[in-house]
């Protein structure tokens, strides 16, 4: 670690480091790092409006203390992305980077690329080099959320493993090695193993990550999340309406092809209130709930009958 630090300090005047700072200084917000899990839980609730199960924070923090990446796995809309980003930000005290994966993700998109015209004119050097988020995160010592890792290809996953293992990024064209300088550079992956047409994660990958499973919240938990997210808007929803929505999403999670997550439930109830507002009503009624329900729950033609049925 000490040695790494020295190496980094040598790079203080490095043009790539300067470029990274220049590019990202306005988008990276700095705050006091928070590494105490209990304090983190409180800030997640009060500031980020995220109700996170304590074990999620405890295990994530333990993994980070050990420089180990974490994998959040579970169904869509259970808060994986938002919770991951918030925890990384609190841990490092700087806004985390979020990389949404796709099949064609490669080193040029996440580490760095060369400006084609400039590289032609001036060569593959620091001047024509464009640093990308993963390299930027390592240089700035902040966290990275690699979202939906199963959507990326195996080569990309192997590339990440190498970086995670060695905590450094090599740029052969520049003959440069950038090394992790602090412990703010931590990684959270997210994935939904049930999503169809996704890649399997290799054993090598799974061996290295600390896996944390996300599940749909219980009725009580989900009610608390609604209260937290809707804030004052909740006064326009009678309990009876909220209970109906809570019940319906549970049926849909069991039977529908499109399974609504907590994210959908929150959107549904918010839309219900806004709909009532737009009709100048003091409170939302069942009709508003149903109208908003079609917009939120009906995402797959195969669910048509079921949606009609539950919203009846
Ligand atoms: N534990 C939670 N606390 C607060 N809001 C939550 C929680 N879980 C889900 N949500 C809702 O879902 C949204 C975040 O979902 P997201 O992170 O995109 O889920 P995922 O990445 O699992 O698909 C939030 O904006 C909020 O509306
Ligand atoms: Mg997500």
Image (spheres, rainbow, N blue to C red):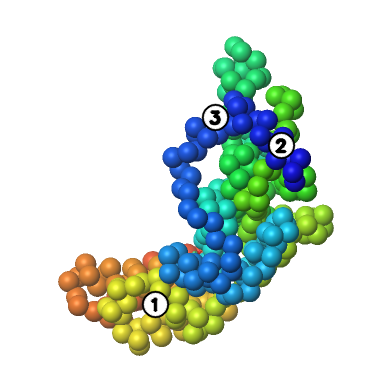
Q: Nearer the viewer, mark 3 or mark 2?
A: 2
* Image mark for residue 6: 2
| 10 Å crowding of disc 1: few (<14), some (14-19), many (20+) | some
Q: Which residue is label 1 attached to?
A: 227
Q: Foreground: 29 or 114?
A: 29
| 10 Å crowding of disc 2: few (<14), some (14-19), many (20+) | few
- Residue plotted at (66% across, 19% down): 124
- Residue plotted at (62% across, 39% down): 139
Q: Position of residue 10 (x, y in %)?
A: 68, 30
Q: Position of residue 29 (x, y in %)?
A: 46, 48
Residue 132 shown left or right of residue 264 in the figure: right
Instruction: Report which quarter residue 78 is drawn in.
Output: bottom right
Q: Position of residue 107 (x, y in %)?
A: 68, 37
Q: Position of residue 233 (x, y in %)?
A: 30, 73
Placement of the C terminus among the 4 image quadrants: bottom left
Image vertical order of residue 168 relative to residue 273, above or below: above
Residue 15 shown left or right of residue 4 in the figure: left
Image vertical order of residue 44 relative to residue 96, above or below: below
Q: How many numbered dots are placed on residues in this image?
A: 3
Q: Whole-Å distance between the Cαs marked 2 and 1?
A: 49 Å
- Residue plotted at (68% across, 55% down): 150
Q: Foreground: 197 or 161?
A: 161
| 10 Å crowding of disc 3: few (<14), some (14-19), many (20+) | some
Residue situated furthest bottom in the rendering: 240
Q: Which residue is label 3 attached to?
A: 19
The mark that comes first in sequence, 3 or 2, is 2
């Amino acid at each position: 670690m000490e040695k790494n630090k020295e190496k980094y300090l040598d790079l203080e005047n490095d043009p790539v480091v300067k470029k990274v700072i220049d590019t990202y200084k306005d988008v990276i917000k700095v705050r006091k790092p928070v590494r105490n899990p209990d304090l983190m839980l409180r800030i997640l609730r009060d500031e980020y409006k995220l109700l996170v199960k304590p074990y999620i924070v405890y295990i994530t923090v333990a993994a980070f203390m050990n420089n180990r990446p974490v994998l959040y796995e579970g169904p869509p809309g259970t808060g994986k992305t938002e919770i991951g980003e918030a925890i990384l930000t609190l841990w490092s005290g700087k806004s985390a980077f979020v990389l949404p994966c796709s099949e064609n993700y490669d080193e040029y998109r996440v580490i760095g690329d060369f400006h084609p015209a400039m590289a032609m004119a001036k060569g593959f050097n620091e001047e024509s080099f464009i640093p990308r988020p993963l390299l930027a995160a390592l240089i700035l010592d902040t966290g990275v959320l690699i979202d939906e890792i199963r959507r990326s290809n195996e080569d990309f996953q192997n590339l990440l493993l190498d970086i995670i293992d060695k905590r450094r990024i090599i740029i052969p064209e520049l003959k440069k090695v950038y090394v992790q300088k602090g412990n703010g550079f931590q990684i959270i992956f997210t994935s939904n193993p049930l999503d169809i047409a996704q890649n399997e994660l290799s054993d090598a990958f799974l061996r290295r990550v600390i896996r944390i499973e996300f599940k749909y919240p219980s009725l009580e938990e989900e009610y608390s999340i609604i209260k937290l997210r809707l804030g004052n808007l909740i006064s326009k929803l009678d309990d009876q309406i909220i209970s109906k929505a809570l019940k319906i999403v549970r049926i849909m999670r069991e039977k529908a092809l499109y399974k609504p997550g907590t994210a959908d439930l929150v959107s549904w109830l918010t839309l219900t209130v806004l709909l009532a507002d737009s009709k100048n009503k003091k409170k939302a009624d069942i009709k508003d709930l149903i109208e908003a329900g079609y917009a939120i729950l009906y995402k797959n033609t195969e669910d048509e009958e079921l949606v009609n049925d539950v919203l009846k």
